[in-house]
Image: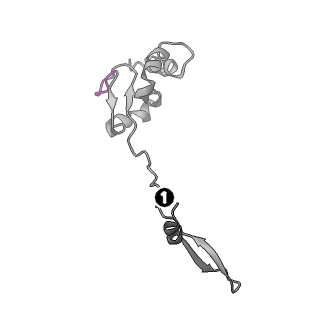
Amino acid sequence: MSENLKEETMGTANDGKGGKAEQRRQTTPPAPTVENKEPEHLIYIGPTLTGGLEEHALFIEGIPVRVAKRFEELPELKELFIPVTDFPAGRIDIQTPGTEFYAALQSLKQKGVV
């Protein structure tokens, strides 16, 4: 660091005791923080249902109200919306007994929706 730059970044301040304390100013602003505001992309891994919910439907900006209303009568539907990044594993899990996706699918079948 050059002496000129050093002098520009150094300053003095009153230390509250009648003396002067050395104070350093920051020469570069802190890097701005970036928050991830991108909506999560979801995919429905359940079977096609009447009312417009199709197997492998992609939801980019959240789940539409018309679909979310069905959660009241069929709460297991909510389990079948997963992040797109989890889709390969979800396709396997929905066919694997003992997984939450398999249980949700079986519940829909018992209710006669599928």
Q: Is residue 54 magenta?
A: yes
Q: Is residue 35 magenta?
A: no
Q: Is residue 59 above or below residue 88?
A: below
For numbered disc 1, what is the local secondary structure? loop
Outermost residue on the right side: it is 17
Return the x and y of residue 105 as percentages of the image width and height.
Answer: 46, 19
Quarter of the image that includes the C terminus: top left
Quickly name the residue at label 1. 30
* Residue range corresponding to the magenta coloring: 50-55
The rendered magenta stretch, by its main secondary structure, is classed as loop
Q: Is residue 95 left or right of residue 50?
A: right
The residue sitting at 38% across, 42% down in the picture is: 38
Q: Is residue 22 above or below residue 81?
A: below
Outermost residue on the front side: it is 3
The residue sitting at 43% across, 19% down in the picture is: 88
Return the x and y of residue 65 as percentages of the image width and height.
Answer: 34, 40
Depth check: 114 or 30 in front? 30
Inspect the image, locate mark 1, and give the three-letter code of the amino acid beneath it.
Pro
Q: Is residue 98 left or right of residue 60?
A: right
Depth check: 52 or 34 in front? 34
| Count of numbered circles on the image | 1
Depth check: 67 or 29 in front? 29
Depth check: 37 or 97 in front? 37
**Rendered image quadrant of residue 10:** bottom right
Return the x and y of residue 60 as percentages of the image width and height.
Answer: 33, 35
The residue sitting at 43% across, 30% down in the picture is: 83
Return the x and y of residue 73 as percentages of the image width and height.
Answer: 43, 32
The residue sitting at 50% across, 71% down in the picture is: 8
